[in-house]
Amino acid sequence: MELDQRDHETVTASAQLALDQWAARLGVPADPEPGLLAVLDQHMARIVAAVAAVTTVNLAAYADGVADAAAVRGWSPSVAGDWRDASWVSVHLLAVCMLARSAA
């Protein structure tokens, strides 16, 4: 099924909204410290390898899949006061949000 331009714009806007909501839930730092950036780089490399193409839609779908799989195991999103204490899932979703920012 081929999407027309308007459908494509709607899907992309919805995906961006989902990513913005993840960023708000997680409390994405405006200027991450160097140690966190190094960890995020590792996560971003995994994400890039996992998605077919780094697009807003693919990143939003990936984030939802990661969150759904983690929620089944008891994880729930929370704002990290100190990212060094955050769960792997939270840091991974933060990396998705940061990757989406750089891809936009």
Image (cartoon, grey):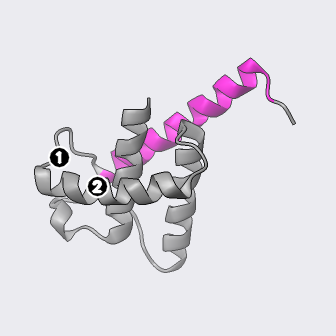
Mark 1 and mark 2 in contact? Answer it, CB < 8 Å.
Answer: yes
Figure quadrant of the N terminus? top right
Residue located 43% across and 60% down the image = 46
**Res. 39 visible in picture:** yes
User: In the displayed image of the protein, which residue is found farthest to the top?
Assistant: 5
In terms of sequence position, does the residue under pointer 1 or pointer 2 come before the other? 1
Residue located 39% across and 43% down the image = 99
Q: Quadrant of residue 91?
A: bottom left
Drawn side of residue 4 relative to residue 50, left or right: right
**Res. 93 visible in picture:** no
Q: Which residue is mark 1?
A: 32
Drawn side of residue 63 relative to residue 34, left or right: right
The question of residue 57 being in magenta is answered with no
Q: Which residues are magenta?
A: 3-26
* Most foreground residue, 34 or 89: 34
Q: Which residue is mark 2?
A: 40
Residue at disc 1, secondary structure: loop
Estimate the spatial distance between the alpha carbons at disc 1 and disc 2, rounded to whole Å: 9 Å
Tell me which amino acid carries mark 2: Leu
Residue at disc 2, secondary structure: helix
* Most foreground residue, 14 or 45: 45
Drawn side of residue 73 relative to residue 32, left or right: right
* Most foreground residue, 15 or 48: 48
Percent from the top left, x then y, of residue 24? 35, 44
Residue 75, compared with residue 13, is above or below; it is below
* Most foreground residue, 54 or 90: 54
Percent from the top left, x then y, of residue 31? 16, 40
Camera-side mark, 1 or 2: 2
Residue 40, compared with residue 3, is above or below; it is below
Percent from the top left, x then y, of residue 67? 50, 63
Mark 1: give few (<14), some (14-19) or many (20+) Cα within 10 Å. Answer: few
